[in-house]
């Protein structure tokens, strides 16, 4: 439409200066894009830029790589009205979208996502955090989530012919593996992301909104069932009850050679093999099992969405970049290059030949994210879920501790209480 309008103006002579602005004859409009470090390889970005500028000959890309450290404040500053020559497109963590959308700082991309971008096929764990009511602010780009990394040789020695597909099978198999000096599973006591999946599978939540107020809900029967499963699974190994998966880093524990399983993103396998080359070829992956074999367990889905600041100088150009990056061609290319899950369930076949990524995609098809409120960051800042988990694993009454943790979550989500 833009090119047809300019051509018409030149032909009619209504605006002679427009003739000098035809694509290819004027200075291109620069679109500034902020992407996070290591989200995409340098080679991928070069290929994308060349292709985009070839097919959009009135636009030029200026891709600037950002560090995760300090990014929240940097993005907030860039989103301020009248902030100047800021970015036109920003990659943000999927759970960060509510934080940035608060106060109307992001452009509403609902029409574009409904019309052109296959919204109905987006991964729920990426799409839901990007939405506020009926408005879509964040467009899913790529996802990653936890799977089970396991020792194929130890499974074989225990007589386990295939990975478990249900929680009951998982417990039974892990119990077989938890013998002879080996840990059936290494699961740290404060791995609350993994716990979240068990709670969601039971129909519970970490927190829920009612009448525009958020409340912690760890004390519901469903959430308590999720915690009980976590307790039984965690007991089949030697994971510390008072620390999370990074203290000590579970890759190092697994690499020591006495652990049959961990719950982690598949990419951690590379770190494990670097530490212990003898494990090369012995590691496998399967989705976190669900309550039934009909579908894998629900998992926390991490990843990134793309957003457009409300203060962009050209929303048309910005959405063109978003549409290209998140479209099937380049989203599939990114997933294959970086071992991510593509942003749509219909694109999962693109990574089917990678065992770890395929296991991620199976879980991501119905993955979820943390509660959709800007205040959730305050919960994580002094996370009461971790303390709750430790207390229960140390033998405290789960219902009592769940009520205590739920009150703390509520206080963080409603600071005026």
Image: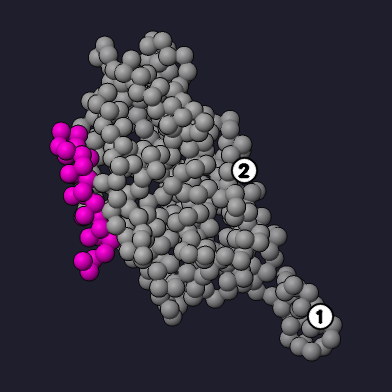
What x and y, as percent, mark residue 135?
Answer: 52, 66
Looking at the rendering, which quadrant does residue 176 occupy?
top left
Residue 140's disc is: none
345 in magenta: no
What x and y, as percent, mark residue 190?
Answer: 25, 39
Query: Which residue is painted at 61% across and 36% down in the image?
Result: 349
Q: Residues within 10 Å of mark 1 (few under 14, many from 20)?
A: some
Query: Which residue is painted at 28% across and 53% down in the image?
Result: 216
Question: How far apart in space, not on screen, are marks 1 and 2 (Cα)?
Answer: 41 Å
In the rendered image, which quarter contains the C terminus?
Answer: bottom left
Mark in the foreground, 1 or 2: 2
SS of the residue under disc 2: helix
Residue 8's disc is: 1
Q: Which of 198 and 79 is in front in this view?
A: 198
Q: What stretch is highlighted in magenta?
A: 389-417
Instruction: State the predominant SS element of the stretch in magenta.
Output: helix
405 in magenta: yes
Q: Nearer the viewer, residue 239 or 68?
A: 239
Mark 2 lies on residue: 346
What x and y, as percent, mark residue 167?
Answer: 39, 28
């Amino acid at each position: 439409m833009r090119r047809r309008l300019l051509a018409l103006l030149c032909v009619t002579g209504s605006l002679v200066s427009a003739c000098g602005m035809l694509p290819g004859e004027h200075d291109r409009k620069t679109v500034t894009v902020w992407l996070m470090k290591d989200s995409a390889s340098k080679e991928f970005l070069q290929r994308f830029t060349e292709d985009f500028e070839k097919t959009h000959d009135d636009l030029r890309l200026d891709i600037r790589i950002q560090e995760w450290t300090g990014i929240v404040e940097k993005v907030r500053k860039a989103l301020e009205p009248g902030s100047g020559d800021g970015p036109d497109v920003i990659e943000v963590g999927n759970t960060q979208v509510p934080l940035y959308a608060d106060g109307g700082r992001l452009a509403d991309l609902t029409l574009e996502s409904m019309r052109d971008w296959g919204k109905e096929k987006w991964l729920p764990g990426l799409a839901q955090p990007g939405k506020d009511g009926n408005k879509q602010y964040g467009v899913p780009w790529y996802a990653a989530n936890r799977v089970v990394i396991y020792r194929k040789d130890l499974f074989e020695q225990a007589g386990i012919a295939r990975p478990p597909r249900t929680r009951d099978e998982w417990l039974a198999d892990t119990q077989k593996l938890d013998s002879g000096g080996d840990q059936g599973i290494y699961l740290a006591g404060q791995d609350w992301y993994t716990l979240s999946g068990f709670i969601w599978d039971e129909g519970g939540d970490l927190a829920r909104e009612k009448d525009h107020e958020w409340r912690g809900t760890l004390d519901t029967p469903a959430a308590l069932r999720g915690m009980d499963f976590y307790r039984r699974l965690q007991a089949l190994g030697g994971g510390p009850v008072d620390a999370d998966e990074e203290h000590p880093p579970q890759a190092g524990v697994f690499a020591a050679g006495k652990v049959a399983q961990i719950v982690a993103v598949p990419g951690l396998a590379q770190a494990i093999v670097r530490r212990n080359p003898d494990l090369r070829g012995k590691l496998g992956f399967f989705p976190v099992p669900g309550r039934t074999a009909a579908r894998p367990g629900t998992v926390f889905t991490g990843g990134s969405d793309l957003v457009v600041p409300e203060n962009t100088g050209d929303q048309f150009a910005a959405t063109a970049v978003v549409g290209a990056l998140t479209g099937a061609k380049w989203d599939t290319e990114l997933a294959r290059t970086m071992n991510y899950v593509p942003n749509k369930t219909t694109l999962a076949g693109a990574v089917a030949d990678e065992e770890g990524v395929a296991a991620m995609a199976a879980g991501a098809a119905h993955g979820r994210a943390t509660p959709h409120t800007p205040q959730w960051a305050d919960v994580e800042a002094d996370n009461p879920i971790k303390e709750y988990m430790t207390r229960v694993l140390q033998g405290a009454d789960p219902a009592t501790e769940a009520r205590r943790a739920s009150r703390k979550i509520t206080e963080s989500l409603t600071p005026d209480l």
